[in-house]
Image: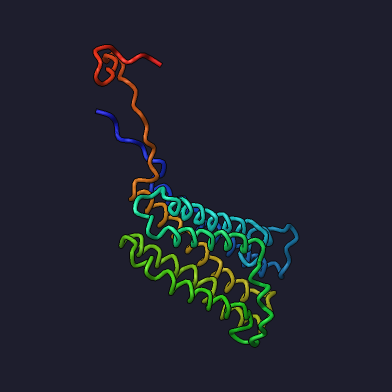
Amino acid sequence: MAAPAPRLLEPQALRRALLALVATLATLGLAAELGYALAGEEDPYGLVAFAGLSYEQNLPTWAASALLLGCAGLLWLIGRGIAPGAGRWRRHWLGLAAVFACLSLDEVAEIHEQWGWLDAGDGLLYYSWVIPGAALVLALGVIYLPWLLALPAATRRRCVWAALLYLGGVLGMELPLGYWTARHGADNLGYGLIDWLEETLELAGASVFLYALALHLLAEGALVFRLQPGPQRGAPPARAPGTGSPRPGP
């Protein structure tokens, strides 16, 4: 009897790796913010700029971009038909892959910051890009609701949790961050802690979604190595079907 085909991906290992990544980045980011405040808002060695979640073009930024790009890749694989049963919703999977590819690019290019021309005010809407951002999320939610309801229950539940975490960070926490920035500026511990929470939620949401997609592919039997077992040592060679002679060796 052939041994079971080994998996390309082990769910427990992936979950531990993603949890370790988010926990490490969040811990380093929090330490950077607290250290910056305790050092009198000085960063002589550039450690805060390297590890702080409230900074751009640094380690957390590229990690977040990689997570989002990983989600885009798995969505694209599903949309291309690697998982059985994706045909009806192929356009939805591929469309979502494009969305996450754009999010990955935006994470490093900060394209959404160019939407600040709306000038919505100086309170909760200080970062006024949240208005078109929320409208876009609402439109996508309406379009993708049938797709979400058609998912297997476990995948749907994980996707909902991922959306709550990610959108809670990228849109929800942007409101108190704008309120604080309008009144106290951005170069202080309060700003750093609010932004740290926002970015941590985004990292957690992207990680949960990546995990959900990987488990969906595993459940569909798409992320499995299918190896052809060789003959056991000492066993007679296999015979070609319909013939009385042994199959030629390689």
Residue 22 place in picture, x, y as percent: 51, 58
Quarter of the image where one finds residue 105: bottom right
> What's the residue at 68%, 58% (across, down)?
47
Left/right of residue 124 with respect to residue 185 in the rendered view: left
Quarter of the image where one finds residue 181: bottom right
Residue 73, can we see it? yes
Quarter of the image where one finds residue 117: bottom right
Q: Nearer the viewer, residue 162 or 29?
A: 162
Left/right of residue 102 with respect to residue 3 in the rendered view: right
Residue 104 place in picture, x, y as percent: 58, 60
Give the quarter of the figure containing the C terminus.
top left
Furthest residue to the right? 44
Q: How many marks?
A: 0
Q: Nearer the viewer, residue 146 or 58?
A: 146
Residue 23 place in picture, x, y as percent: 50, 58
Q: Nearer the viewer, residue 177 or 170?
A: 170
> What's the residue at 38%, 41% (across, down)?
224
Give the quarter of the figure containing the N terminus.
top left
Residue 16, can we see it? no
Q: Is residue 70 above or below residue 236?
A: below
Q: Nearer the viewer, residue 15 or 97?
A: 97
> What's the residue at 60%, 59% (across, down)?
60
Furthest residue to the front? 242
Left/right of residue 44 with respect to residue 52 in the rendered view: right
Q: Is residue 119 above or below residue 113?
A: below
Furthest residue to the top? 245
> What's the residue at 58%, 84% (across, down)?
124
